[in-house]
């Protein structure tokens, strides 16, 4: 694939960018240049926010009924579906996600999510009349919150964008999307699809750029709500800015989730699930269970089985359909992961991996790595590494396992493994986390997703996400 995009998508048109700066997309596996797009600048954000405000005041979007919004969203889903193979290839080439996964999640799940919200939009009641205790009635309205500044990272760039765009469209908002500079060739396809779906001008604009541009969007006076996914560090900065502006914000941030293996678990089933639960997208997934809590009575057996499983995962070009572990998304990110591995070697016992695969000369690969004898207070057990690096921690009894799982600044994901799923669910109830899987893990688009503690504020997905893009208005009908 070679894409050289000359224009930005703003106000329903492909327009010349305000500056001549460009963002290059680089292949994580071959280190070759895949293409480039314009880098947005503050003047482009100004235009996009103006167009979004205009769409909410003067376009067909402002007066669209829930049914009309729903139809537009289905057209948008059709246009994304048409581009599914390009989306999967663009994501996998840029950030190294195994293609099987990008097909399922970045393309397939994205379309499913959009259609799910299109259906919710269709039947949405926007006004309700309530009797008041005073004898009068009150009209309670749900109105769109307004212009949404959506800022996303590079690890699941399309689905994370759609987790904001779809409920925001269902609510009747307009969106300015700022993707991460590491992944720009996928979101241009979202913009193309928005154009093909004939969403009214300004309902979705596409302005890629780095953190300064993101910060500019967050504090823009024309933005009514910020929806952010990314690191907890950036999330804190954005939360402070939004606090100053009294601007609603939702934050999906980092994680360091635990998999609790109860002593009656099926170890083989867990090892089979490691690629999706603990090393999804080569570990570059916010909810990865990278802390594996094993009962002391089965500790050695667990370490051996996981090490054997992990070292057998096919690693290579993400476009190869057999690949289970791809490269890191960028050279800088690989360095970060490697510095954690170096730290881990001083804190725990390296059981497998720890280096770069000798057979892969190009690309930002890191071997799938397992550390044993890890204390939960170790840096590798406390900090988000965002790579294929697992820490296996021993626990004494169930209470100890729950204590260790909760001894983290984060609370995004988690899993519990047991042949008694009711018992596992009872343990899950005691975990301080926004989402937990029993004998597996996959976010359900019909249920709220998000974190507690340093993992974020607010929820995406499920009907609940729509409320984050609406505000209530009460009209007291006194006479
Ligand atoms: P990052 O925070 O560096 O950047 C994320 C996005 O925010 C990028 O588009 C970036 O340009 C922008 N940005 C950075 N600083 C900003 C600022 N001060 N103001 C406005 N915008 C700013 O994160 P990353 O390294 O790109 O992504 C990885 C992180 O994302 C990990 O911590 C991961 O856990 C997290 N993540 C969370 C979820 C979730 O749902 N909870 C999902 C995926 C990724």
Image: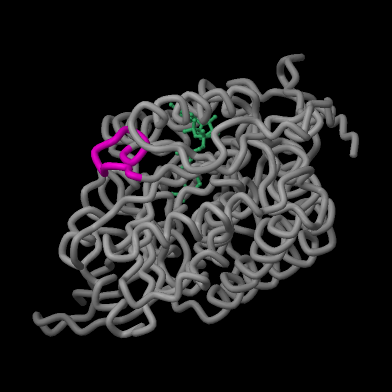
Vertical side of 107 occupied by 429: above or below: below
What number of labels is visible?
Answer: 0
Task: Say which of 32 and 6 sits in front.
Answer: 32
Residue 410 in the image: x percent, y percent?
Answer: 30, 46
Residue 39 in the image: x percent, y percent?
Answer: 69, 23
Task: Say which of 125 and 54 sits in front.
Answer: 125
Q: Assess whether residue 22 is covered by the magenta stretch.
A: no
Q: Is residue 303 visible?
A: yes
Q: Is residue 303 left or right of residue 165?
A: left
Q: Is residue 98 left or right of residue 166?
A: right
Q: How is the image coloured?
A: one colour
Q: Is residue 138 left or right of residue 19?
A: left
Q: Assess whether residue 378 is covered by the magenta stretch.
A: yes
Q: Main secondary structure of the magenta part?
A: loop
Q: Which residues are magenta?
A: 373-382
Which image quarter: residue 355?
A: top right
Residue 429 in the image: x percent, y percent?
Answer: 24, 72
């Amino acid at each position: 694939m070679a894409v050289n995009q000359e224009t930005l998508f703003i106000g329903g048109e492909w327009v010349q960018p305000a500056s001549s700066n460009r963002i290059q997309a680089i292949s994580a596996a071959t280190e070759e240049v895949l293409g480039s797009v314009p880098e947005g600048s503050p003047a482009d954000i100004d235009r996009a926010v103006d167009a979004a405000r205009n769409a909410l005041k003067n376009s067909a979007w402002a007066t669209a009924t829930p049914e009309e919004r729903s139809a537009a969203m289905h057209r948008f889903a059709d246009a994304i579906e048409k581009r599914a193979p390009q989306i999967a290839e663009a994501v996998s080439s840029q950030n190294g996600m195994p293609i099987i996964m990008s097909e399922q999640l970045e393309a397939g799940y994205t379309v499913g999510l959009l259609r799910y919200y299109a259906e919710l939009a269709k039947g949405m009641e926007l006004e309700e009349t309530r009797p008041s205790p005073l004898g009068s009635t009150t009209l309670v309205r749900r109105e769109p919150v307004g212009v949404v500044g959506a800022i996303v990272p590079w690890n699941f760039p399309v689905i994370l964008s759609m987790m904001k765009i779809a409920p925001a469209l269902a609510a009747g908002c307009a969106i300015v999307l700022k993707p991460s500079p590491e992944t720009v060739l996928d979101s241009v396809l979202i913009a193309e699809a928005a154009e093909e779906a004939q969403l009214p001008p300004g309902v979705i604009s596409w302005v890629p750029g780095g953190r300064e541009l993101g910060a500019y969007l967050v504090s823009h006076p024309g933005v009514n709500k910020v929806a952010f996914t990314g690191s907890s560090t950036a999330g804190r900065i954005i939360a402070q800015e939004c606090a100053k502006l009294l601007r609603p914000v939702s934050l999906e941030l980092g994680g360091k989730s635990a998999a609790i293996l109860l002593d009656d678990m099926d170890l083989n089933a867990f090892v089979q699930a490691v690629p999706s639960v603990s090393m999804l997208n080569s570990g570059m997934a916010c909810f990865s269970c990278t802390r594996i809590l094993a009962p002391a009575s089965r500790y050695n057996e667990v370490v051996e089985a996981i090490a054997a499983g992990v070292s057998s995962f096919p690693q290579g070009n993400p476009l190869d359909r057999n690949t289970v572990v791809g490269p890191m998304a960028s050279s800088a990110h690989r360095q970060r992961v490697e510095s954690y591995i170096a730290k881990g070697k001083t804190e725990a016992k390296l059981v497998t991996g720890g280096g770069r695969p000798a057979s892969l000369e190009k690309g930002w690969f890191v071997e799938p790595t397992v550390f044993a004898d890890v204390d939960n207070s170790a840096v590798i057990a406390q900090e988000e590494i965002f790579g294929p690096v697992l820490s296996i921690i021993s626990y004494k009894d169930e209470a100890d396992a729950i204590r260790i799982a909760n001894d983290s600044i984060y609370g995004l994901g988690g899993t519990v493994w047991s042949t008694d799923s009711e018992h596992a669910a009872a343990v899950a109830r005691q975990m301080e986390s926004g989402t937990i899987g029993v004998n597996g893990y996959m976010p359900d688009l019909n249920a709220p997703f998000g974190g507690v503690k340093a993992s974020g504020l607010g929820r995406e997905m499920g009907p609940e996400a729509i409320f984050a893009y609406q505000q209530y208005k009460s009209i007291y009908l006194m006479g």
